[in-house]
Image (cartoon, rainbow, N blue to C red):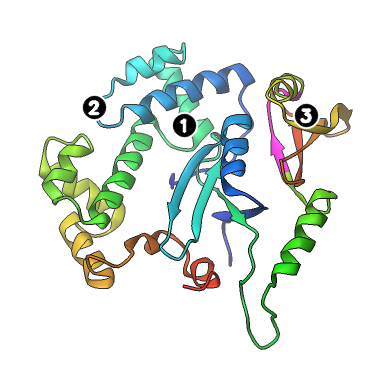
Amino acid sequence: MIQRMSHSAIFVLDQDVAKDFYVNKLGFEVKMDESMPNGFRWLTVNPKGQPDHQIILMKVAPSPFEGSNVQKIQPKDVDTIRELMKKGAFGAGVFQTADCRKTYEEMKAKGVEFLSPPKEQFYGVEAVFRDPFGNWFSMTQPKNI
Amino acid sequence: MPAGYRASALVHDETFRRLCRARDLLAAEYQSQVQLDRAAREACLSPFHFHRLFRSTFGETPHDFLTRRRMDRARHLLASGQMTVTEVCLEIGYSSLGSFSTKFQSLVGVPPTQYQRQVRRVFGFERPWKIMLVPACYFSAYGA
């Protein structure tokens, strides 16, 4: 049986912009940032409290898998993804904090765009923010703090 | 990757910040004989509480964190082929080659000399050894 998840991906449009956002605005740490000779850049980060899960900041680019029933991603598909991302089509996950209101103020001061300010929910306090590309996240302070 | 990591309840926000500061200090000074007491002071905690909270928050002890960082760096340096095993040992802050080798083997599975040989055998001196850092499916998806 699968026991753990070691990597997951957030798709981004520009890896330099993404690195600045996730490290300098969200406070994550860089786990790996290695560029390969074919131009592929392996950039992973993690929240400081979760050192064993790498978030791949994966650039949306034409190419990936091509097989019998999988079609190659074309440049026009990248444009479609970019547009959908901007429209908020991709909710990319839930982050946890021990103090949602305080973290909200700090992130706002750094220029992070919030779609929803901290609100009381039955499971805790939750705010919603987005990254520079449109990926949106819940930031939740669970009730058991 | 920290062994035995288990998600636990979040610590208080201010405590988390102080623990992060101490962890950053350890990370920045991983080459020197780091004083764990100093890191505990940075976190404004007694050494005992620092150890306990660090472990429950990050899933590994401060000492394990340091060792992991050193060995990650050692693997990188050994794979890049620019340094001998002795040079790598000194670079990451070990003064004894024996202790370095033993610790490396216990975490990586093979002694540093063998690790370096394996990387060279697979990738050669010139070829991009960095691809060993990336899951092959991601790499090959990009036309490698």
Determine the secondary structure under disc 3: loop
Task: Tell me, yes or no, whether the highlighted magenta stretch contains residue A97.
Answer: yes
> Residue under mark 1: which chain is it in?
B
B52 or B42, which lies in front? Answer: B42
**Residue at horizontal 77 percent and vertical 32 percent from the top:** A113
> Residue under mark 2: which chain is it in?
B
Other residues around mark 1 within 10 Å, as few (<14) / some (14–19) / many (≥20): some
Q: Is residue B61 above or below residue A92?
A: above
**Residue at horizontal 38 percent and vertical 16 percent from the top:** B47
Q: Which residue, given by chain and number where applicable, does mark 1 sit on?
A: B55
> Residue under mark 3: which chain is it in?
A
Q: Which residues are magenta?
A: A94-100
Q: Which residue, given by chain and number where applicable, does mark 2 sit on?
A: B32
Other residues around mark 3 within 10 Å, as few (<14) / some (14–19) / many (≥20): few
A100 or A134, which lies in front? Answer: A134
B128 or B95, which lies in front? Answer: B128
x and y percentages locating residue B28 in the rendered image = 36, 28
Determine the secondary structure under disc 2: loop
Q: In 3D space, how far apart are the residues under numbered discs 2 and 3 (Cα atoms)?
A: 41 Å
Lateral position of residue A136 relative to residue B116, left or right: right
Determine the secondary structure under disc 1: helix
x and y percentages locating residue B26 in the rendered image = 36, 27
**Residue at horizontal 33 percent and vertical 21 percent from the top:** B36
Q: Is residue B38 above or below residue A29?
A: above
Please state which of the two labelled residues, at mark 2 or mark 1, is closer to the viewer.
Answer: 2
Other residues around mark 2 within 10 Å, as few (<14) / some (14–19) / many (≥20): few
Q: Which residue, given by chain and number where applicable, does mark 3 sit on?
A: A143
Q: In 3D space, how far apart are the residues under numbered discs 1 and 3 (Cα atoms)?
A: 22 Å
x and y percentages locating residue B60 in the rendered image = 43, 37
